[in-house]
Amino acid sequence: MAATEVLDPYEIAKGLVKDAVENLGLDDSVYELLKNPQKFVEVSIPVEMDDGSVQSFIGYRSFHNNALGPTKGGIRFHPDVTPEEVKALSVWMTIKSSLLGLPYGGGKGGVLCNPADLSPRELEALSRGYIRAMAPHMGPYKDVPAPDVNTNPQVMAWMFDEYSSIVGENTFGLLTGKPLILGGSKGRVEATGRGTVVTIKQAANHLDMNLAETTTVVQGFGNVGSVAARLMHDAGSKVIAVMEVDGGVYNPEGLDIPKMLEYKVEHGSVAGYPDGEPISNDELLTLECDILIPAALENQITSRNAHDIKAKIVAEAANGPTTPEADRIMTERGILVIPDILANAGGVTVSYFEWVQNLYGYYWTEEEVNSKLEQMMRQAFDWVYNMHTERGMKMRDVAYMVAISRLAEAMKVRGWLPAQRSTYRRS
């Protein structure tokens, strides 16, 4: 690995923003307003444990930029959560929402904990404690959280209920990713993985690839990765390997993804699945395949392994799985990298649909949700891909330019910036 390679996700995010501002010829003041969150909150959350003791957990929320609308982003419960990670993810949420044309800014939250060590009662107490601590900073027109790593609709239900108790009224538009009975949107659970597959299909069309003749590798088999794997399998692609934190499975003849999903429900993991061979994470990433879907955590593809990636398309279902140096290496090698802010934007897009449905009290069918999602994802992909080919620039660079051009315009007309005009406009 190169000694100078940057692995801090927050520094990576700021660097990508700075590059886009320079590529657009914008004033440095744009970068100054986007490099740091507008507000960052750290709280201590006391929880009475089942044994009667009290344990204090640290929680974070980064409110990056609200020029286009209320901040929007998930809450993750993870033992490796850091302020830098949360800030980086909030930057990416701002860029992602702007790229898709959503009326949102970026936010992100996290709690430093291991949910596997908590009982259901302790997890509920922690969820309610987090929202109590953050309630002054949240609201349907202020900040709208959602599920993320190790949180789910049940956690959102507890948080919704706690906030509604605080304000004295049901506030369905506070959170997205809720259970359907509490105003959740049909199609939300599958949205991120489904959106990723929409971008892959668009890329395959542009590259004249027949998905039924392709092979796919998926790193991460949680909500996003498992949905992406199933949809790729349904589209005819041969999914030859999947990976989870406790092990991976490889079968060059193709894995039966529906059966693997059943196996995971029964055993809690894909590790040990009988119709395949064990494989390590390093081996999986460098397998010979057509499509690689990193759907795990940050910094999985770096300068250490980018030269060995053999896929034709890398679709970033995770946030920040590829370092800038690795992105450069793969692009020079002719690999099409669909950047995270585009590939995994399906989640925030359907969260937007849920928020709109909550505000209006009018709900759509799953077919309507999926159709609207596909239309928006295809349109965003084509914007980025066409500019990528016309200008000979990386997909990631173009995506950031599209997003930051819109942000800069919003900040300018709001009076946050000196009068200026971007040299870049969507075609």
Image: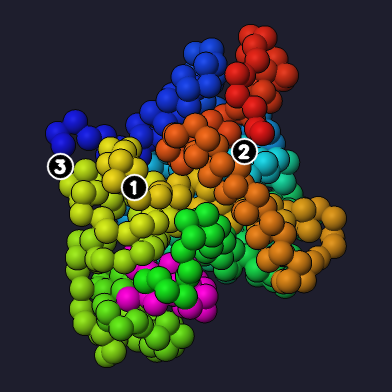
- For the residue pair 274 and 161, the one nearer the viewer reads as 274
Compared with 230, 400 (above or below) is above
Q: Give how far across and how far down residue 401 sits, in percent.
A: 53, 31
Q: Residue at x 29, y 89 (%)?
A: 275
Q: How is the image coloured?
A: rainbow
- The tag earlier along the polypeptide, 1 or 2, is 2
Magenta range = 216-240
Q: Mark 1 against mark 2, which lies toward the viewer?
A: 1
Is residue 19 left or right of 99 when viewed as pictured? Answer: left
> Gap in Å between the C-alphas at discs 1 and 2?
27 Å
- Please state, as top left, top right, bottom left or bottom right, where the N terminus lies in the image: top left
Q: Give how far across and how far down residue 91 sits, in percent.
A: 49, 36
Q: How many marks?
A: 3
Res. 369 mark: none
Q: Which residue is mark 2?
A: 98
Q: Amino acid at mark 2?
A: Ser
Q: Which residue is mark 1?
A: 334
